[in-house]
Image: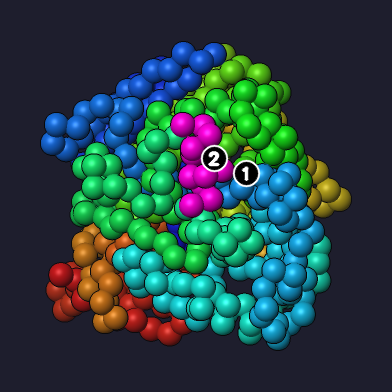
Amino acid sequence: MTRIPLLLLFALSPLCPAAESGIDAAAAQAAKAIPGACIVHGESRAGSRRFTLHGEAPGEEGDPQRALFEIGSISKVFTGLLLAIAVEEKQLSYQNTLSDLTDISFTDPAVGRITLLQLATHTSGLPRLPTRYPFDVLDDPYADYDRQKLDAWLKTASLEGEPPYDASYSNLGFGLLGDLLSRAYGKTWNELVQEKIAGPLGLTDTTQHPSAEQLGRLMPPRSGSEAGHRWRFSALAGAGALYSTASDLLRFGEAFIHPDQTPFAKAIREVTTIHSRAHGLGGPVGLGIMVRQLHGKPEFSHSGGTGGYRSHLQILPEDKLVHAILINHSDSAPAALLNAADHRSEQEAVDTIKVDKAALDRLVGIYQIGPASKFTVIRRDELLMAQLTGQPFIALDPLTPTRFRYRGVDAELQFNPGNEKPIGLTLFQNGREIEAKRTAETPPSILFPKAAQLAAYEGNYKLGFGGVLKITARGDTLFAQLTNQPAFPVFMTEQDRFQYLVTEAALEFKRDANEEVRGLILHQNGKHEATKQ
C-alpha cells in the first residue's frame, strides 16, 4: 500500500470513548496499552506549569520537562511564524510567488504563480508530497530530498484545475515555504528558527539538529512492537524537522497567549488570523495553525507525527491554557487524550428512538470533509454505521430521524436535509462542529465478521518488494500495517477479501488445502503477493 509519510497534520481526532477523568488519567491508560510508549504531558495554566510522564523512560532520564521528542508537523507553526516575521521585516510579501523567488523555468506557469500565502494555508494546489520519489518505501523518507530534487520536480510539475483551490494538506507546500524562506535570508531554515524564534523565546531544546547531550534525552522512537526510525530533513525541513520538549512547547504556546510580551507580537497575531476557511482541512486555518472554536472560545492547535513519534499542541488564549502532549510511539493519538479529558458527563444520558430501514437508507452515503477525510455511512440491519477515514465503523443511535449519537463515543452526527437525501452532515464532538458534504459516491457493501473469524487472518506477511504487512484484529475490525506506516482498518467485502477505505487498495487472503490462511495479495497498482511468516 502506498504510504503517506505522516508529518501530521490538520487531521481529525479519532472518535474514541471518553476517559473517566482528566488528560493524565487517559495518558496513564494509553501508556499501559501501548508497549514501550512514553507519554509526556505539559500544561500551562495562567503561566503555572506542570509536567507528567507516563510509561517508559529509558535509562535515568525521567524528567518530563527535558525528555526530547520529534514534533513533526508542529514545525509548520514555526514556519508560518517565520513567514509572518519575514513580512513584518519587509524581507518578503505574502503575495511573492515562486517565480519571484526562484530562477526555475516552470513548465506550468501556474506553478510559478503560487504565492507564499497559499503555501502557508495549504491552498496552493500542490499535492501532499512530490511525485516520482519513493517516500513510501524509505525508513527516513525526507533525508535525501534536497533542493536540487525539489527544483527539478517543481520545474516539471503541473496543477490540476484553476485557483482558488480549496485547502488540501501539503507537506510539500510547507517544506517548500521553509526552503523559500531559507533562500530569501541566505540561511538554513534551522538557523532562522534559532535566530528569529527559539533564541528570543528561550527555547533551548527546539532544534532541527540536536546535540549529543540532547540526543541523550531523546525518547527512542517506536512503531507497533518494533523500534521506529528517526527522520532527518533536507529541503523540506519546514514541514516537520524539529525536535523539542514539553517545556519548550509550553513556552512557545504562552507566546500566543501573551504576544505583546514577545519581540514579534504582530507576527503572532498574523499567524492566528484566519487566512482561509479551509473546508478541506475541517476548519479555518491561519499561517500553519488551525484556528477553531472550542465550546465557543478560540482554539489554536496542530498535531505532529513522524516515523515513531506523535505530538499535539493546543492553545486556548481566553483560558490562558496551553497543552503539549508528546509520545514516542506511532500507535497513539495525542489529541484523543485531550478529547477524553474534555468529556462532558451531562451528555451521557440520552433517549433514543426507532427509525425504520427506509428512512435509514436515505441517510446512507459518502460525506466528504476534504480530499483526505470522509465519512462512510452504511446500514447494518436496523442500525446506521459511520466510519471516519482511517477508523473503524461505529454504530449510531438515533435521537431524532436526522440526528444520531455515536455508541460509546461522546459525539453526534446531524444529517442536513435536502430534497430527497441529505446534502451533508455535521459532526459535533468536543465542542467543535465539522461539516461534510454528500458526494455522488456509493458506499461499499461491508460484511461484519465476528472477532473469532478475524483471528484467522492475523500475522505478518512478507511482500516481494521488501515490506511486511502486519495484520491484527482489534475487536470486530481488522487492521493492516505496512512497515513504517500507521495501521489502517480494512473491511470485509466478501469472504477472504478486505478493502481499504483510506486508499484505493484491497487485500485478498489465500488459503492452503487445509483452509488455513497462508498468504495474501495486495491489490494496488497491480498485484503484490505476500507470504505469511
Label placed on residue 81: 1
Q: Residue beneath label 2, please?
A: 197
Residue 384 in which image quadrant: top right
In the image, the segment drawn in magenta is 191-202
Circles 1 and 2, Cβ within 8 Å, touching? The answer is: yes
Mark 1 or mark 2: which is in front? 2
Residue at the spot x=27%, y=62% of the render?
470
Label placed on residue 18: none
Disc 2 is placed on an element classified as: helix
Above or below for 128 versus 256: below
> In the rendered view, how is the structure colored?
rainbow
| Side of 377 where 27 appears, left or right | left
| Side of 266 where 35 appears, left or right | left
Q: Marks 1 and 2, how far apart in space?
A: 8 Å
Question: Residue pushed farthest right?
Answer: 419
Q: Earlier along the polypeptide chain: callout 1 or callout 2?
A: 1
Residue at the spot x=46%, y=13% of the render?
48
Nearer to us in this view, 265 or 512? 265
Residue at the spot x=31%, y=66% of the render?
139
